[in-house]
Image (cartoon, rainbow, N blue to C red):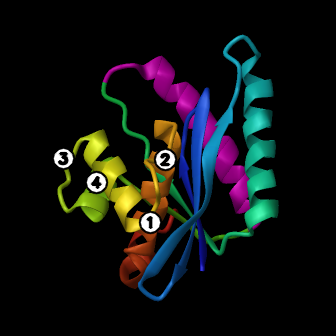
Amino acid sequence: MIILGIDPGLATMGYGVIEVAGNSRRAIQYGVLSTRANEPTPLRLRAIFQGVNELLDIYRPDEVAFEELFFVQNVTTGMAVSAARGAALVAVATRTENLYEYTPMQIKQAVTGYGKADKQQVQRMVKALLNMDEIAKPDDAADALAVALTHANSMQMKKLFKIK
């Protein structure tokens, strides 16, 4: 099974593609889709939409998992990231209904065993669980791999996390 994990963002959207075979997991590819801050928002959203479509064309994932958005203070940033997440969701939804989402705490719990783990702990565990030579960079890509791993580890209960 191929899983695409997405860490939503307007300036930088992380993606991680993993292959799951039984208890084995391996990273296929990871990186970011980037947009320039000086471009109009509609053009940035179109670039995200097109970029996600390219990822879907290249890797043909069986399922796609998103990190659920969580904002404490900055509403303006939250709205922009929500729009970017929406562009990515529409791209994926045109291809499949196998869309899932996980909270940051669920991701930390699934990857490290501790729901309040820090970013470095998560990154080290992603590296170890995927048997990678180095920690994925940038951070958004490492986060997206963690999302994909969380989904892989939630297969028995995945219906609970399906986006409705």
Name the quarter where the N terminus is drawn.
bottom right
In the drawing, what numbered circle is on residue 136? 2
Element class at badge 1: loop
The verdict on residue 83 being magenta is yes
Q: Of the residues under marks 1 and 2, which one precedes in the sequence?
A: 1
Q: Of the residues under marks 3 and 1, which one precedes in the sequence?
A: 3
Side (left or right) of 69 relative to 65? left
Q: Gap in Å between the C-alphas at discs 4 and 1?
A: 15 Å
Are the residues flagged by discs 2 and 3 in contact, CB closer than 8 Å? no
Quick one: which residue is furthest to the front in this view? 133
Are the residues flagged by discs 2 and 4 in contact, CB closer than 8 Å? no
Q: Of the residues under marks 4 and 1, which one precedes in the sequence?
A: 4
**Label 2 packing within 10 angstroms: few (<14), some (14-19), many (20+):** many
Quarter residue 160 falls in: bottom left
Q: Of the residues under marks 2 and 4, which one precedes in the sequence?
A: 4
**Label 4 packing within 10 angstroms: few (<14), some (14-19), many (20+):** many
Q: Which residue is mark 1?
A: 130
Element class at badge 3: loop
